[in-house]
Image: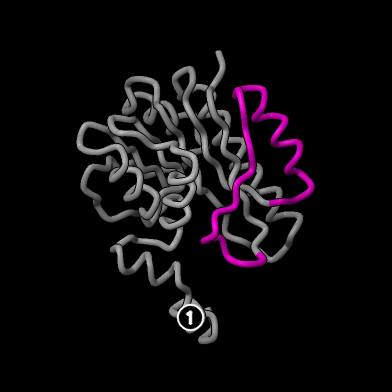
Amino acid sequence: MTKAWVKSRKHDRYYRAAKRQAYRSRAAIKLSQIDRAYGILHPRDTVVDLGAAPGGWSQVAAERVGPKGRVIAVDLAPMQPLEGVTILRGDFTLGAFQARLFELLGRPADVVLSDMAPRLSGNKPYDEARVFDLADAALSFAARALRPGGDFLVKVFQAEAYDGFLDRVAQHFEALKGVKPKASTAGSAEIYVLARGRTG
């Protein structure tokens, strides 16, 4: 990270807002904005947060579902404990790990969130392919883990593979749309696919 990047980050209004509200990441503001606009998180919900570290999305989810709700945070990276959040560390893409996750979940989830992203290499085609590989893994999990009518929110890129991914999501959900919260960095190719109402 360059000094200029660090300086610009400190002057970013959403970075400051996250710090002010004691969120662990700027990304928390993005989820908060999406939830305010579309109402995906509700009291008593069971939520699975994929790619959760350092925990900003899990914090927002725990606030919205309340003490009678449940949040399971999943990531390869270690994560400091969070009140109201169960943390499961491991490689989400492995079948054995997903079996552990389903066992911990116990019953269908109401919402699956995925802010998963690979470490970017700078090779654009490779990075984009990795983003959609992770999104497809999240979609496969959501299609199995969600209750009928449940919702799925996943981060992807506006890239060549985007339309094909939307087609795959549409096979499992009643409605979907791409959403870009105001807190997304200007010029970023990231977009969030919000899928409502799991079918089946």
Position of residue 167 in the picture relative to residue 181 (left or right): right
Q: Report the residue marked by disc 1.
A: 6
Q: Residue at x 33, y 68 (%)?
A: 19
Q: Amino acid at mark 1?
A: Val
Q: Quadrant of residue 134?
A: top right
User: What residue occupies the far front of the structure in this picture?
Assistant: 37
Residue plotted at (28% across, 63% down): 22
**109 sits left or right of 144 in the view:** left
Question: Where residue 119 sits: x, y (%)?
Answer: 57, 59
Q: Percent from the top left, x then y, of residue 69?
A: 27, 33
Does the rendering let one see residue 76?
Answer: no
Looking at the image, residue 63 lies above or below residue 122: above
Residue 154, by quadrant, is top right
- Residue 21 within the segment the image draws in magenta: no
Q: Magenta segment, which residues?
A: 158-187
Q: Nearer the viewer, residue 43 or 46?
A: 43
> How many C-alpha atoms fall within 10 Å of the one at disc 1: few (<14), some, or many (≥20)?
few
Residue 98, how many percent across, how many down? 44, 30
Q: Is residue 30 something one can see in this rendering?
A: yes
Q: Position of residue 116 (x, y in %)?
A: 52, 48
